[in-house]
Amino acid sequence: MQAVNYTTARNNLKDLIDKVCDNHEEVIITTKNDKSVVIISLDEYNRTHAALRREVQEAIAEIERGDFMSLDEAFDKVLAKYED
């Protein structure tokens, strides 16, 4: 992942967009006041968003079926792995 400052990004925006889209890369754009953004291609955003939506729907279905463990059960299970 490449990081560039705002001025460089502004001056090279088309090239950055082409690089992100053609090479499936992310680019971080930084500013002087410590604010940053990440540029990803629309295709990558759509894939990620779709995957997240599927995972949330699956989690909701599991909860509705009662197919989950309590926080205490999960903690005990993880703790048991470290005690071995």
Image: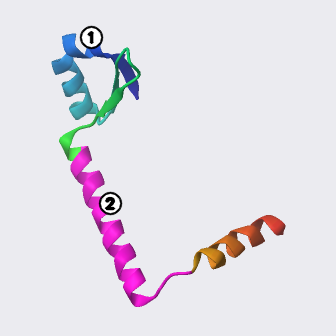
Depth check: 60 or 12 in front?
Answer: 60
Q: Residues within 10 Å of mark 2 (few under 14, many from 20)?
A: few
Q: Is residue 32 left or right of residue 20?
A: right
- Residue 75 — which label? none
Which residue is found at the position 40% from the left and 89% from the top? 65
Q: Name the residue type under label 2.
A: Leu
| Most frequent secondary structure within the magenta stretch | helix
Cα separation, mark 2 vs mark 1, equals: 33 Å
Residue labelled with disc 2: 52
Whole-percent x and y of residue 19? Answer: 25, 26
82 is within the stretch colored magenta: no
* Residue lying furthest left: 14
Whole-percent x and y of residue 79? Answer: 74, 68
* Residue lying furthest front: 33
65 is within the stretch colored magenta: yes
- Residue 7 — which label? 1
Which residue is found at the position 36% from the left and 25% from the top? 35
Disc 1 element: helix
Disc 2 element: helix
Identify the image quadrant of residue 51.
bottom left
Query: Quick check: 49 above or below 55?
Result: above
Q: Residues within 10 Å of mark 1 (few under 14, many from 20)?
A: few
Pick the quarter of the image with the N terminus.
top left
Identify the image quadrant of residue 31.
top left
Read off the magenta span. Answer: 44-69
Q: Nearer the viewer, mark 2 or mark 1?
A: 1
